Image (cartoon, grey):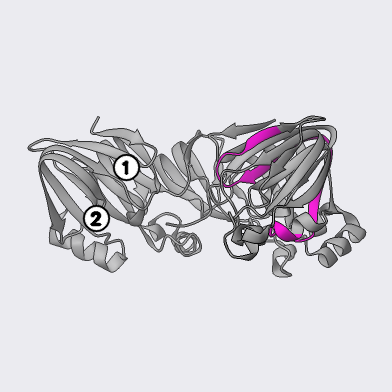
Amino acid sequence: MFRLQGSKVLAVDMAGDAVRAKNGSMVAYDGQMAFKKMSGGGEGIRGMVTRRITGEQMTLMEVRGQGTCYFADRASEINLVSLGGDKLYVESSNLLCADGSLRTGTSFTGLRGGASGHGLFTTTVEGSGQAAIMSDGPATVLRVAPGYPLCVDPGAYVAHQGNLQQNFQSGVTFRTLMGEGGGEAFQIRFEGDGLVYVQPSERNTVGGEV
Amino acid sequence: MPFREINSRMVEATIAPGRRMFSQRGAMLAYRGEVSFTPNTQGGQGGLGAMIGRRVAGEAAPLMTVSGQGTVLFGHGGHHIQVVNLTGDTLYVEADRLLAFDGSLEQGTMFMGSQGGVMGMVRGQVTGQGLFTTTLRGHGAVAVMAHGGVIELPITPGRPVHVDPQAYVAHHGEVSNKLSTALGWRDMVGRGSGEAFQLELSGSGAVYVQASEEKL
């Protein structure tokens, strides 16, 4: 029921069910729709407190109704992700819309978050259903398989799903300290089995400076 | 067909003697042939009266007349361009979103209050459109700018379309619009869903919606 209208508009057909979407991202709808802000992303009091403390704040609204609702945000490219019981890790600012049946939560990312300019926590989406994530430019999906690890620039990382271990790797050498670095001093290394979403654009990060 | 789309952000227009065209001032990128660009102090057609009307209404976009023979490329600010073909009906669009249009189209200014009275004026204020909007009527093509891509949503009787005022670009056809509010107690206490105001369009025609909530 999630479909793309062009690459920048998400159309969701609804028949009385609900989806969760980023606050204020509706651009148009037909039929009957009701919009309700969900405090703390609908994760209950505990989730709300966690989000406040971790700074991984997310303002979502619940959209319920019958008809077709169109979502878009600042002309970002939209990618559809289907989840079949696995977990999607995405930055809360890159999450546009998720099925009402999916659960959202926060998780600790370790050192990576600090270097990618994201903060130390990220949002997880779990369950079976569809989600839509946003990227600056069309995202590439890269597969990671056992024995084939993948290194990603922290500024170009958007999301990942599946059973992946991530660790932070740095290529800081004598040259970097002399101010002659290649601008690629830090990478995130993914190992295991899953998918990584990478955007063709880099956010300003600490790692990109050196 | 006067406009040919080169890519999503550029259109090429063919100019022939006796078939002039109006465009936003400074929107020309390149041209071939003998084409002249005259700044249009009147800001469009309709003589002195219409000019004063537009000035008062704040809908006086700086336009220029493009005439001669050849082809002209138009584009502005890297915005996406949507070409709308009119066959006798009226297009309602904000003056600053107009990139270029056929000289054969009749340009006018519409007072928002004439549709829906006081609520029409409130709507103009909320949507940031002001109290007036530009209308184009006749047979011809119009190039409209939008941030991000544009989708066209059909409006059929009995199935009104609701649009976020910030994402609204233009509409055409026999459409009446009104501002619908979904203000509840949640909005009053600062817990709104960000969708408190919507533009409800009903009738028959089509509305153009951009994939962004940014104004130009």
Residue B17, percent from left and from top: 7, 37
Query: Mark 2: which amino acid?
Result: Gly
Q: Nearer the viewer, residue A129 or A144?
A: A144
Question: Could one spot residue A60 in this view of the protein?
Answer: yes
- Give residue B26's mark: 2
Q: Nearer the viewer, residue B75 or B125?
A: B75
Magenta span has A131?
A: yes
Residue A77, percent from left and from top: 57, 42
Which callout, 2 or 1, points at the residue further toward the start of the chain? 2
> Considering only vertical position in the picture, is A201 above or below A178?
above
Residue A51, percent from left and from top: 83, 61
Report the span colored magenta.
A114-142
Element class at badge 1: strand
Q: Nearer the viewer, residue B33 or B187?
A: B33
Residue at point 79% right, 51% down?
A123
In this picture, residue B181 sits left or right of residue B204: right
Question: Could one spot residue A14 in this view of the protein?
Answer: no
The rendered magenta stretch, by its main secondary structure, is classed as strand
Residue B23, percent from left and from top: 23, 49
> Which residue is disc 1 drawn over?
B143
> Considering only vertical position in the picture, is A140 above or below A90?
above
Same chain for labels 2 and 1? Say yes or no.
yes
Q: Nearer the viewer, residue A154 or A149?
A: A149
Give the chain letter at badge 1: B
Q: Residue furthest front?
A: A174
> Crowdedness of circle 2 by 10 Å Cα count: few (<14), some, many (20+)?
some
Query: Mark 1: which amino acid?
Result: Ala
Q: Are marks 2 and 1 in contact (CB under 8 Å)?
A: no
In this picture, residue B138 sits left or right of residue A62: left
Element class at badge 2: loop
